[in-house]
Image: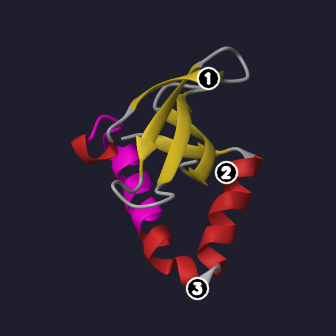
Amino acid sequence: MFHLLFSSTAKTQLESLKKNNSLKKRCKAVLKALAYLETNPKHPSLNTHKFSSLEGPEGEEIFEAYAENKSPAAYRIFWYYGPNKKQITIVAITPHP
């Protein structure tokens, strides 16, 4: 099991998603994806893969996980392992461009 940490950006994005009633379904999908990420970052439904356009504050590899798939502006979670063992830092929770 991993402990999830949130950047200030990710924390703000998640809170905004929780407050928006029109995005309730999307919020539920993001929370479910975060639960999978906490237990198994390689869970098949997350479609986790390396995201080469970004890197963490100490040069960590950034990964992209799917909260939704096959829907317009599907939400994605960007994260990296660390800073300590058994920790994952969520960098951003955002709709796919």
> In the image, is residue 90 above or below residue 59?
below
Front position among marks 1 and 3: 1
Residue 80 quadrant: top right
Q: Which amino acid type is marked by label 2?
A: Ala
Q: Amino acid at mark 1?
A: Ser
Specify the quadrant of the image occupied by residue 49.
top left
Mark 3 surroundings within 10 Å by alpha-carbon count, few (fewer than 14), some (14 through 19), many (20 or more):
few
Question: Which range is magenta?
Answer: 29-43
Outermost residue toward the left? 44
Q: Which residue, given by chain and number where applicable, does mark 1 sit on?
A: 53
Nearer to us of marks 2 and 3 is 3
> What is the tally of numbered marks visible in this picture?
3
Q: Which residue is mark 2?
A: 10
* Residue tagged 3: 21
**Can you give x and y, in whole percent of width and height, for residue 60 in the image?**
60, 18
Please check the rendered image and state whether residue 7 is part of the magenta-colored stretch, yes or no: no
In the picture, which quadrant includes the N terminus? top left
Q: Secondary structure at mark 1?
A: strand
Choose the circle earlier in sequence order: 1 or 3. Answer: 3
Residue 64 image offset from top left, x and y in percent: 47, 36
Which of the two discs, 2 and 1, labels the residue nearer the N terminus?
2
